[in-house]
Image (cartoon, rainbow, N blue to C red):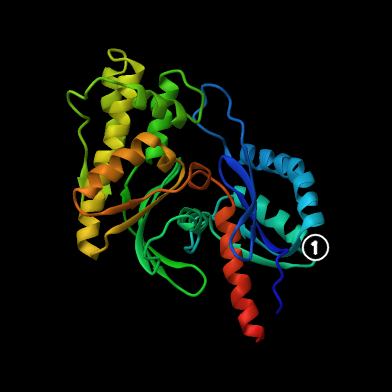
Amino acid sequence: MKQNQNNIIIGIDTSCYTTSIAAISLDKKVIFNEKILLKVKKDSKGLRQSEAVFQHINNLGEIDSKIKSIINKYNIVGICASTKPRPIKNSYMPVFTVGYNFSKLCSTMIGCDLYETTHQENHIEASLLDNKLNKEKFLSVHMSGGTTEILLCTKNKESYDIEIVGGSKDISFGQLIDRVGVKMGYDFPCGKYIDENALNCESAIKQGLKTSVKEGYMNLSGLENQIDNIIGNCGKEYISKLVLDAVVRNMIKSIEHISKEYNIKDIVFAGGVSASKYISKELTNRLRKYKINAYFTKPEYATDNAVGCALIGVKKFENKSLNYK
């Protein structure tokens, strides 16, 4: 099957808080990366699935002009959509059916192949795009609004075999950050406000929050309770720094244990929380003391996006092309 320079793959991801569409050339250059954040009411801590589904439908309607411009300039040879949160049995969220069904319609109308992947695999692939590490076997840390997981990734033909080897046993880092942020009066999602506060805080932390980590797994809900006890007595910048410092210390304890257990020194970070400048700087510097290499990607690839979907689509297209030879 001949591959010309105008051939591209479209990626589509409709997650809990972002409508995303991306286009990748077959030599893995990002042609297009469009995202629309879902709207969350003030003082709210999130969206119901039904509300998110409705917004995704409207957002995909708004993106149609962008898709038209791509069709006019490039030859779309495949569309790859995330169909569920994780590559495991019974993983399901209604929001992903919107992007998948939209992709089915587009692929039929365009006359191209339709490929499937998952939101988690999408994040991993996007985080690897501009990072040079051993991609045969590594640890991936997924830190987002709904997930805090440490994953053992082993390369297979089209993507990666993924095994959960650590993470949070209760709430996620994203939930902790957003809950504290809403209590301090910030709009959801609160990550950018908390990150900016922490970076601007010049006060040294007198006593960090108590952490609970055992064999790579964390309990984070206790951190929120500790913050509740002091939130009225400290400034917003200091509270923000306390929270992100606790995120860093929990993660270091978990990664140090798992790195030793699996003898892996390369860690790639994905998910919206990993876009925090405070967290990326502190984790990189502190993990270096344990001779562990921390890899962070650009914020546009760390937060929800569809670039990873498109990259996986390229792999699936290439594998199909090889089968024709």
Q: In this view, does 4 lie above or below 129?
A: below
Q: In this view, does 137 lie to the left or right of 299?
A: left
Q: In the image shown, does 241 or 165 lie closer to the viewer?
A: 241
Give the number of callouts.
1
Q: Is residue 224 something one can see in this rendering?
A: no
The image shows residue 6, relative to residue 230, as above or below, that is below
> Is residue 179 depicted above or below 83 in this figure?
above
Judging from the image, what secondary structure is the residue with disc 1 in? helix
The residue that mark 1 highlights is 110
Residue 210, compared with residue 213, is above or below; it is above
Please name whichever residue, 33 or 303, is drawn nearer the observer in this view of the structure. 33
Residue closest to the far front: 5
Residue 9: horizontal and vertical position, in percent? 67, 62
The image position of residue 41, as x and y in percent, is 58, 25
Q: Picture quarter containing residue 47?
A: top right
Residue at 17% across, 23% down: 206
| Residue 301 shown left or right of residue 183 in the figure | right
Quadrant for residue 18, please give it: top right
Q: Could you tell me if residue 275 is visible in this image? A: yes
- Position of the N terminus, as image quadrant, is bottom right
Residue sitting at x 59%, y 71%? 316
What amino acid is found at the position of numbered circle 1 in the picture?
Ile
